[in-house]
Image (cartoon, grey):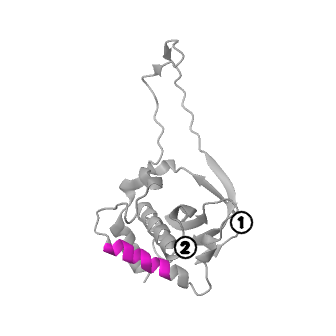
Amino acid sequence: SIASDEASKLSEYEDYKYGVTRIEKNTAGHKNPFGRGKCVNTSLIRYSLHHEFKTDVAKISFGCDTSNYPTMLSVMYALLNSFAHELNIERRDIKACLTYKITHGRMEHKIIIYDAVPGGAGHSRRLVTEDGEVLKAVIKRAVNLLDTCKCSPSCYRCLRNYENQKIHEMLDRENALNFLKQLG
């Protein structure tokens, strides 16, 4: 099912759990930048940064197993790339993130596609139609994109881009292709 909420609030954040951002304790210390010997600070504080803005949003839920985080990341980027091509918009004008909830001890991921500009540009709302034809066309294009690319595990033609370079090693074209093919 897909839900659209015009002018929804959305928070972007780095997910520490999957190694996107890592904090390590500095046991060796470092030279004080002001030239006053060695820095002895041993405390480490974890911060999570986020930014909130109102924009157009489409949430995509799947009626199948979505518990594999790397697969769902790969599916998310395949759908984003195909959505931009299908609707003839700039790829940088739309973004996405994964959200999840734990049900019966299992993680269920959903993809949230949103306009990259505060206030929204209406792109993500175009994905939501009563007959579902736009989403079907986007999925079909994603399957074609992933099927015609012969890289392993992913490349800049199918899933990778500058924005997701921190997770390139997690993106897998074949896993995304298999997931999208099962949607029928």
In terms of sequence position, does the residue under pointer 2 or pointer 1 come before the other? 1
Magenta residue span: 137-148
Can residue 92 be seen here? The reply is: yes
Residue 7 image label: 1
Position of residue 30 measured from the top left corner of the image (x, y, whole percent) = 46, 21
Main secondary-structure element of the magenta-colored stretch: helix
Question: Split into 4 quadrants, where in the image is the N terminus?
Answer: bottom right
* 129 drawn magenta: no
Residue denoted by label 2: 61
Residue 43 against residue 52 in the figure, above or below: above
Residue 160 picture quarter: bottom left
Judging from the image, what secondary structure is the residue with disc 2 in? loop
Q: Measuring 46% from the left and 72% from the top, which residue is drawn there?
A: 82
Q: Nearer the viewer, residue 85 or 183?
A: 85
Residue 9 against residue 134 in the figure, above or below: above
Judging from the image, what secondary structure is the residue with disc 1 in? loop
Residue 24 image label: none
